[in-house]
Image: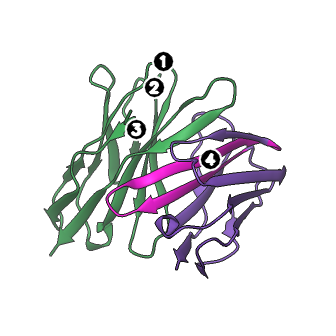
Amino acid sequence: AQKITQTQPGMFVQEKEAVTLDCTYDTSDPSYGLFWYKQPSSGEMIFLIYQGSYDQQNATEGRYSLNFQKARKSANLVISASQLGDSAMYFCAMREPLSNSGYALNFGKGTSLLVTP
Amino acid sequence: DVKVTQSSRYLVKRTGEKVFLECVQDMDHENMFWYRQDPGLGLRLIYFSYDVKMKEKGDIPEGYSVSREKKERFSLILESASTNQTSMYLCASSLRQIYTEAFFGQGTRLTVV
């Protein structure tokens, strides 16, 4: 079963505007971590932001913030004041316990963001 | 800086060949991962290792095996390469804790002809 769902294959946003990238997840474990990564056309995977399941506050890192709604099982990424360099693929990922073997890391299918001038 | 290094950036192999993809990390991470990335499908977990000689199957282990004889090295093996294994392969490593992010290698683009 799909554990991470990103429903927006592609998004457009104008420079300097804010954009929200959606992510919903599925887990029955109370302890998990949610991550967002950026993959520009160069192919490198860049870690952006993390949210723990027990964190009370929504995570923020510079222009990135995470709108974490635990009851809805959603962890949407908000990018404020978009820049041309934000054009990239964005992936939502979840770490959850895997029996006694540590924590696997599963990704969604990604959202392609294009920032226009 | 954490460094995850994959042995090749590009590989071309023939159908039926045995293929080794090597990944080395220099930060003493317990966890290592192999993913394949295909357009529209995101990153799919092939195998995951949580310690030396320990491994867990991911979502798509068929046609692959792995080896982790040393903590810093995690190898992905295609026993008999097929054209449907043409893909981008990404290796990652992380500490064991749930709140720690994974660090990725630069990827290996494998073409099986």
Label 3, label 4: how many angstroms apart (C-alpha)?
Answer: 29 Å
Query: What residue is pinned by disc 2?
Result: A53
Q: Position of residue B18 (x, y in %)?
A: 70, 69
Question: Helix or strand or loop: what does disc 2 sit on?
Answer: loop
Amino acid marked by disc 1 = Pro
Picture colour for chain A:
green
**A99 displayed left or right of A53:** right
Q: Is residue B1 visible?
A: no
Q: Position of residue B25 (x, y in %)?
A: 74, 60
Look at the image and give the colour of chain B.
purple
Residue under label 1? A30
- Amino acid type shown at disc 2: Ser
Q: Pointer 1: residues within 10 angstroms few (<14), some, or many (20+)?
A: few
Q: Earlier in the sequence, mark 2 or mark 3?
A: 2
Label 2 with label 4: CB-CB less than 8 Å: no
Report whether A25 appears left or right of B113. Answer: left
Residue nearer the viewer, A64 or B40: B40
Quarter occupied by the N terminus of chain B: bottom right
N-terminal of the pair, mark 1 or mark 2, is 1
Span highlighted in magenta in the image:
B31-53
Q: Which residue is mark 3?
A: A59
Q: Is residue B76 left or right of residue A45?
A: right
Quadrant of residue B106 in the image?
bottom right
Where's residue B81, x and y in %?
A: 60, 67
Which residue is located at x 32 percent, y 72 percent?
A85
Q: CA distance from mark 1 to mark 4?
A: 24 Å
